[in-house]
């Protein structure tokens, strides 16, 4: 078994190194990297200008990471008179670990679930700050804006796609006999399938793909993958355990849920 790990650095290299140390051949493929967002330097002033009881929404753990790091460097705490909303459980956990903030969490991790939260019951009275990367999570803001809320999109971090040499990398992966691929986001999966040649796509879709969620599982089905395992976690520890068990069993885990 040869594993291609498609996830951002440094987690990409960490998982690949762990697998190689355990005797499982693994290649890192960090197709996505991150840097400070263009608005990050204004975060202190932006938070200070919000009216009391405004809502701060974080669309990802990375948005919290970048925002919290900036505030810590400025020796500024998160305000206690604001409401905090996390799009997903991992984002909520990250906020709590960084600053003990108990963020509101929707029942479903999408814009519809967010809008159902009680904190958005009277949007015409709200100011909402949305912490995000460059682009993304527009539906929530657009819907709230249409209902009278004052929306401020805040770019806390930037995503940088590494697709320029993807075709030559795919040739290398085929030479290395990659047969198992870990992909931790739908965006990375789309990039893989859209950027490489039709011949390489055919090879790619014959590989066993491991994904962290039902949403990406369904996306992989739609793209034509036939052997898919949903491991219900993007944590390196979980992914390592599943791959280790697959390798020890001598065959691919062929769960298709």
Image (spheres, rainbow, N blue to C red):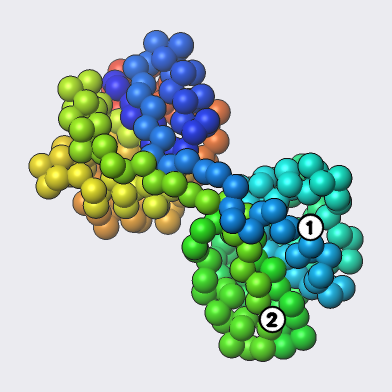
Image coordinates of residue 95 in percent, x first then y, are: 74, 49
Mark 1: secondary structure: helix
Q: Residues within 10 Å of mark 1 (few under 14, many from 20)?
A: some
Residue shown at 76%/65% (left/top)? 46
The image quadrant of residue 178 is: top left
Asked whether residue 178 is in view, the answer is yes
Image coordinates of residue 152 in percent, x first then y, are: 65, 72
Mark 2: secondary structure: strand
Q: Which residue is mark 1?
A: 44
Specify the label residue 150 is tagged with: 2
Mark 2 or mark 1: name the one nearer the start of the chain. Answer: 1
Residue 160 vs 243, above or below: the answer is: below
Q: CA distance from mark 2 to mark 1?
A: 19 Å
Taking 3 as reference, is 53 left or right? right
Taking 120 as reference, is 231 left or right? left
Taking 125 as reference, is 24 left or right? left
Residue 127 vs 13, above or below: the answer is: below
Query: Toward the viewer: 134 or 212?
Result: 134
Residue shown at 34%/56% (left/top)? 219
Image coordinates of residue 34 in percent, x first then y, are: 52, 43
């Amino acid at each position: 078994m040869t594993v291609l790990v498609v996830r951002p650095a440094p987690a990409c290299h960490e998982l690949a190194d762990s697998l190689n140390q355990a005797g499982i051949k693994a290649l890192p493929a960090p197709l996505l990297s991150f840097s400070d967002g263009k608005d990050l330097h204004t975060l202190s002033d932006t938070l200070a200008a919000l009216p009391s009881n405004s809502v701060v929404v974080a669309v990802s753990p990375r948005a919290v990471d970048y925002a919290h790091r900036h505030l810590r460097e400025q020796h500024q705490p998160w305000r206690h008179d604001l409401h905090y909303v996390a799009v997903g459980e991992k984002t909520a956990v990250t906020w709590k670990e960084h600053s003990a903030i108990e963020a509101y969490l929707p029942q479903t991790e999408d814009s519809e679930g967010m809008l159902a939260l009680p904190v958005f019951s009277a949007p015409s009275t709200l100011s909402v700050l949305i912490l995000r990367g460059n682009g993304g999570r527009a539906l929530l803001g657009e819907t709230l804006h249409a209902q009278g809320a004052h929306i401020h999109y805040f770019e806390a971090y930037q995503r940088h796609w590494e697709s320029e040499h993807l075709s030559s990398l795919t040739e290398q992966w085929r030479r290395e006999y990659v047969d198992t691929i870990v992909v931790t986001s739908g965006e990375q999966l789309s990039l893989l399938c859209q950027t490489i040649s039709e011949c390489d796509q055919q090879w790619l879709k014959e590989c066993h793909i491991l994904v962290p969620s039902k949403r990406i599982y369904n996306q992989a089905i739609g793209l034509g993958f036939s052997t898919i395992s949903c491991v219900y976690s993007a944590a390196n520890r979980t992914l390592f355990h599943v791959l280790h068990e697959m390798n020890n069993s001598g065959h691919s885990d062929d769960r298709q849920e």
